[in-house]
Amino acid sequence: MIPRYTRPEMAAIWEPQTRFRIWFEIEAHACDALAELGVIPKDAAKTIWAKAGDAVFDVARIDEIEREVKHDVIAFLTHLAEIVGPDARFVHQGMTSSDVLDTCLNVQLVRAADILLADIDRLLVALRRRAFEHKMTPTIGRSHGIHAEPVTFGLKLAQAFAEFSRNRERLVAARKEVATCAISGAVGTFAQVDPRVEEHVAKAMGLAVEPVSTQVIPRDRHAMYFATLGVIASSMERLAIEIRHLQRTEVLEAEEFFSEGQKGSSAMPHKRNPVLTENITGLARMVRSYALPAMEDVALWHERDISHSSVERMIGPDATVTLDFALNRLAGVIDKLVIYPENMMKNLDRLGGLVHSQRVLIALTQKGCSREDAYRLVQRNAMRVWRGEGDFQTFLKADVDVKKHLSDADIAEKFDLGYHFKHVDTIFRRVFGEA
């Protein structure tokens, strides 16, 4: 985790103290179940909670023990025994390290998902508000980076809202998929621990029982989780790139908010750069990069190896922390995005009406002109405009071949900007609902 791109709430999920607290809760809940089953004394289970339930674990002491025993779970259990005393002998009965590690990781991923869902909700609120604000603000749609036909800026934001709504659904599904618990013992057969212990721990930790866990929870679940984070990051980059393009000097239809006292360049005092969306683009690349190792973690040897362990120690914190930071940054960008409708209109008119060429093409075909001839007539006038020779509508009205099919009034009607926006309400209802 890089402090520069880290928010405290998400970082806290991955701190050692949090991890050891979750480990303890897993072990203590397992002891409760074992006590109910008569495997260990009930007083022992109560003592474990009483002595360590509110304990602050000594991370340095655990690290010290691990340097000797070379095993993180054993180091924790040794430290726990120092706190609990003789009844600590009943902790971890029938369990294996993966029961603790995997269940803990899934708890952390679920908590991280909850923060990320809240982040997406904040972004959706900003997108919705700005979409309705600019629902009918005309701007030019571009394909291949070239002027195509008119759209509204609200439609651009509505598209992003719909995309992030889908991403929210994906994250909810990924959260559910990874929210499983395994307390099944060595190689997952429950030979040394009753399945009812797993059921109890799962319920206590807010998880579902893993149907078959071998000695680890299957990593296809985690692969889907991190792949989902990667998809969300890709959607963020798509929106960030749109803003970066719109902020270019030659376009300047929208730009990031530039605060009082902010400076854009160490050398050029005039600069106002899209630094936030550029940063989001870079962070999105990092989040996507964590999806591949998560997929490679799926293939483990037999019932278990630990080739996935080092990967997850890195990608768990880094992917969630980075995405959390980036989502919050993007929500802030959208919330404060400075929008220039006058520049949008200026750019829309920049090609002298060429954006209405399809309407003229269709009108000619409806008047009996073949599509091939209609395309030729429209294009030859359009190319003159591209060369800077004049205005598209003027050229069409002066073209004798066009005039055989269309009157001046017919041609002028095809340049009505509002025509392109007649279904904006329909699209908005599809995206936002009737309200």
Image (cartoon, rainbow, N blue to C red):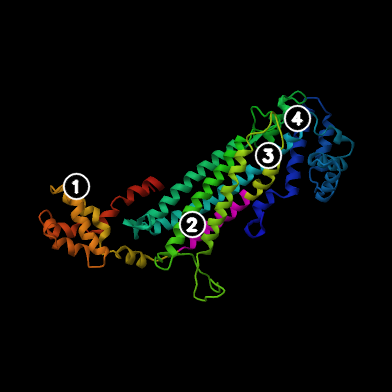
Which residue has dot 1 on it? 371
- Cα distance between the residues tagged 1 and 4: 77 Å
- Cα distance between the residues tagged 3 and 1: 60 Å
Whole-percent x, y for residue 326 in the image: 56, 55
Q: Nearer the viewer, mark 3 or mark 2?
A: 3
Q: Which residues are magenta?
A: 319-337
**Residue at horizontal 55 percent and vertical 59 percent from the top:** 279
- Cα distance between the residues tagged 3 and 2: 32 Å
Dot 3 or dot 4, earlier in sequence:
4
Q: Nearer the viewer, mark 2 or mark 1?
A: 1
**Residue at horizontal 61 percent and vertical 49 percent from the top:** 319
**Residue at horizontal 67 percent and vertical 58 percent from the top:** 3
Write down the quadrant of residue 406 in the picture: bottom left
The circle on residue 308 is 3
Whole-percent x, y for residue 195 in the image: 71, 25
Please name whichever residue, 144 or 62, is drawn nearer the observer in this view of the structure.
144
Dot 1 or dot 4, earlier in sequence:
4
Dot 2 or dot 1, earlier in sequence:
2
Dot 3 or dot 1, earlier in sequence:
3
Which residue has dot 4 on it? 33
Which residue has dot 2 on it? 240
Q: Nearer the viewer, mark 1 or mark 4?
A: 1
Image quadrant in which the N terminus is located: bottom right
Residue 433 showing in the rendered view: no
Secondary structure under the numbered disc 4 in the rendered image = helix
Kind of residue sitting beneath label 1: Arg
Q: Residues within 10 Å of mark 4 (few under 14, many from 20)?
A: many
